[in-house]
Image (tube, grey):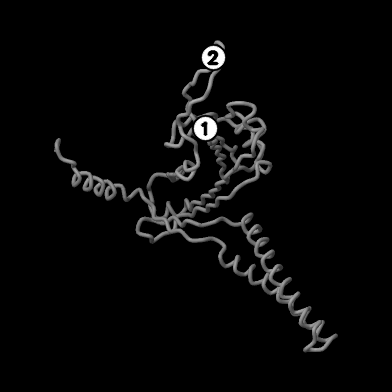
Amino acid sequence: MPRSDNEEYLFRASALKKFTSSVLYLSASVEPEGRTLEQLLFAAVAGVSMVFATVIAFYFQARFGTFTLPVFAALVVGYMFKDRIKEVGRLLSVRLLRNVLYDRRIILETYDRSHALGHLREKVSFVAPDDLPAAVRALRRRGQATDLEGDGQAESVIGYTKAVTLFSQKFERIYPGGPPLTGISDILRLDIRPFLHKMDDPIQRKPLLKDGRIQWVRGVKVYHVHLVSVIEDGNGAKSRYTSSLLTLNRKGIVRVESLSTSAPETAEPGGL
């Protein structure tokens, strides 16, 4: 209706769209990855620290007796080292698991959840700029507005990695005679709201010396976020690269620019 908010129409249209498109959807269930292995490593570290403390206690008891001051001091020192060994071991275990495991696993199933069709593995972590592949660093330099941009304070690099595995043979068994499976549509949403909290005012006034006089001019304050993607497949095909520049101010997105879709000459295996 022209003068109505058409709330019921939009609700029904959305429900109808979901119903008719449901045959194209896959169900996804999320589960953490590596929890059992993580707990086993933590238990092993706790055992090592306990062995250290027990050896110290047995040694001093055998040499100085049971209820003596040296034994008391040894028990205290042994407990101190036991606690530190346990915490350091936990940190090393987490770092080791981060290199070999992902943060979570998403199981892809048919809409009725009767067949597993594949899985996704995802992880997010901060990456040191020196650890970036040369290809990614080259794409990053293409988006620099000035040569001074990369020579100031070190940038924070967030690495997002996703590994997709599809069971194509299962698709053929479940949907015989159907079209061949060439891929899935996966939408990645990046929430920029946490980036906006500490930004300066989007409109600023700055002094300008012109004809011997100082004038105040209006300036727009923006921030740049560089997005570099490296897409690889398991068949040994050449990696594909994309680079985009996201321009933000405190109000949100100003513009998105595509910088490059070609692989740099310094490309090397691997990437983010």
Residue 237 picture location, percent across and down: 59, 39
- Name the image quarter holding the C terminus: top right
Q: Secondary structure at mark 1?
A: strand
- Which one is in front, 129 or 216? 216
Relative horizontal placement of residue 152, taking residue 31 as reference (left or right): right
Mark 1 neighbour density, 10 Å: few (under 14) some (14–19) many (20 or more): some
Examine the image and state in which quarter residue 100 appears: bottom right
The residue most toward the front is 213
Give the residue drawn at x 55%, y 47%.
160
Examine the image and state in which quarter residue 130 appears: top right
Q: Is residue 164 visible?
A: yes
Residue 207 picture location, percent across and down: 53, 22
Above/below status of 98 relative to 244 = below
Instruction: Find disc 1 in the rendering and name its residue.
Output: 245
- Which one is in front, 25 or 195? 195
The residue most toward the right is 63
Q: Is residue 52 visible?
A: no
Q: CA distance from mark 2 to mark 1?
A: 37 Å
Residue 99 picture location, percent across and down: 64, 54
Instruction: Find disc 2 in the rendering and name its residue.
Output: 213
Indicate which disc residue 1 carries: none
Relative horizontal placement of residue 17, taking residue 237 as reference (left or right): left
Three-letter code for the amino acid on which mark 2 is drawn: Arg
- Which one is in front, 110 or 80? 80
Three-letter code for the amino acid on which mark 1 is drawn: Leu
Above/below status of 141 relative to 94 = above
